Image: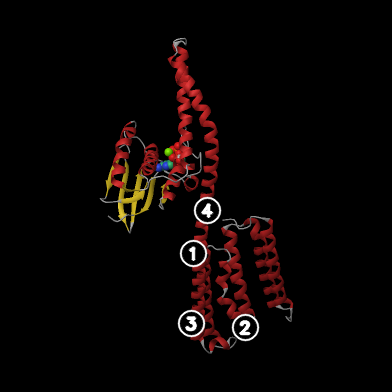
Amino acid sequence: MKEFHGRLHKKYYYMIVSFIIVLMLAGLLVDNPVNSRFAVHGVMIVVISICLLVYPCYENAWMKYMTVISSTGYFYALFYLYPETWSEFVLLCFIPAFSILFFDKRLFYFSLLINFAFIAFTFGYIGFVDKGQDYPYIFIDLVGNVVNFLASQILLYFIFHLTNLRIQKQRLYYEQVQQAERMRTTGQLAAAVAHEIRNPLTVVNGFLQFYVEDPAFSQSQKQSFALMMNELDTAEHVISQFLSVSKPDEGEKVDNVDVELILQEVTDLLNMYGLLNDNGIDLNVEMDCHVAANSIELKQLFINLIKNAIEASPHSGSVKVIAAKVKGHVCIQIIDNGRGMSQEEVKNLGTPFYSLKSKGTGLGLMICFNIVEKYNGSIQFDSDPGDGTTVTLRFPLIPN
Ligand code: ADP
Ligand code: MG
């Protein structure tokens, strides 16, 4: 994910980085004799500064790893160059905190791992080689320092883990809000447009029906009229689908619906559709799967999803439909071995008019999402290109 979207964001980043560089330079220049360790320290500052300054321009995984590695190198270099400054050890404990800024799980684990490797070497060096000569404050209580180091790493791990969980939840919430906003706008648009278009269509359709019966027109003209009426029916169908999204909810009946019954009806209906390409539907439903919903809408939901599965399936491939009770929910899965979808395609599902079919409307899933949300359910698509798709629906179970 890109972190530097706007210029403002970048401006803050550069301000903070400049401050860090000034601090590092102060550490180098203030009260520090110019000798070989001054030179090594200076080189480390140059490397880390370049990494930090260049990062927003490239912002890729490689740059992140380079920045983390160079900062780790920097802090260990300080520790070895200035043994008299005991507080350098505290900085070593905080090295993985640096990678928390990038919110990348793998990068954080990588940083923890290299810190463990470096510290193991460092404690070994102090315990067996240095023996308290340069680092007496660590050698005096070596075990205590090792324990403190481990505790600091565990603490950082928990901070990262909890913050990461919260951010993931927030991201999910943001996506849901976006989806809801999209549905709301589409609904309003649909209501306005559909209303304005439906009436003239009905008038034109009525006239055409009248002309088809009229003996004054020739047979070929009547054929043209029939074609026009067919096209008008298609338009009417799209509008009806759109309207079902924007329809106000009041007055709609919510029943205690037996999923088995509905799925059986839908399967009977769609078996005919599947015959065209020799696709069968295998139904496997547990008894007493009851949910609170409107039966017509639930039917519409299953029809849309199973129809998509059939359309994606190869010749004579079958679609599996499973329903079972799982932890207080009714879980319904529609599994096909069809063309499958990429992650990008899955992300676009439910967007109005998103369709990869030559005759698709791209409204089916938008309606499905709407129905699922209305009855407190959830819908999930697991798909791999070429491997097929599994759609998992969950609705709260009504105990029998
Ligand atoms: P439509 O069926 O009219 O194209 P939908 O909203 O029902 O509209 O579906 C949108 C798109 O999602 C489809 O065009 C198809 O590309 C993709 N899709 C939906 N279900 C599946 C599936 N089971 N396997 C592969 N692709 C699917
Ligand atoms: Mg469809």
In the rendered image, which quarter is residue 1 located in? bottom right
Identify the element where label 4 is drawn: helix
Residue denoted by label 2 = 83
Q: CA distance from mark 4 to mark 1?
A: 18 Å
Identify which residue, 334 or 57, lies in the foreground: 334
* Amino acid type at mark 3: Val
Task: Note whether ligand 1 is within 8 Å of mark 3.
Answer: no
From the top left corner, tell me how far across and down residue 123 is, in percent. 52, 81
Q: CA distance from mark 2 to mark 4?
A: 53 Å
- Disc nearest the viewer among 2 and 1: 1
From the top left corner, tell me how far across and down residue 326 is, in percent. 32, 56
- Disc nearest the viewer among 4 and 3: 4
Q: Earlier in the sequence, mark 2 or mark 1?
A: 2
- Residue 379 has which mark? none
Q: How many marks?
A: 4
- Residue 177 has which mark? 4
Residue denoted by label 3 = 147
Q: CA distance from mark 2 to mark 1?
A: 38 Å
- Ligand 2 visible in quadrant: top left
In the rendered image, which quarter is residue 270 located in? top left
Q: Are discs 2 and 1 less than 8 Å apart at CB?
A: no
Query: Looking at the image, can residue 362 be seen?
Result: no
Question: Neighbour class for label 3 at 10 Å: few (<14), some, many (≥20)?
Answer: few
Q: Earlier in the sequence, mark 3 or mark 1?
A: 3
Q: Which part of the image, by quadrant, shows the C terminus?
A: bottom left
Residue denoted by label 1 = 165
- Disc nearest the viewer among 4 and 1: 4
Q: Residue furthest left?
A: 287
Residue at position x 32%, y 35% in the image: 269
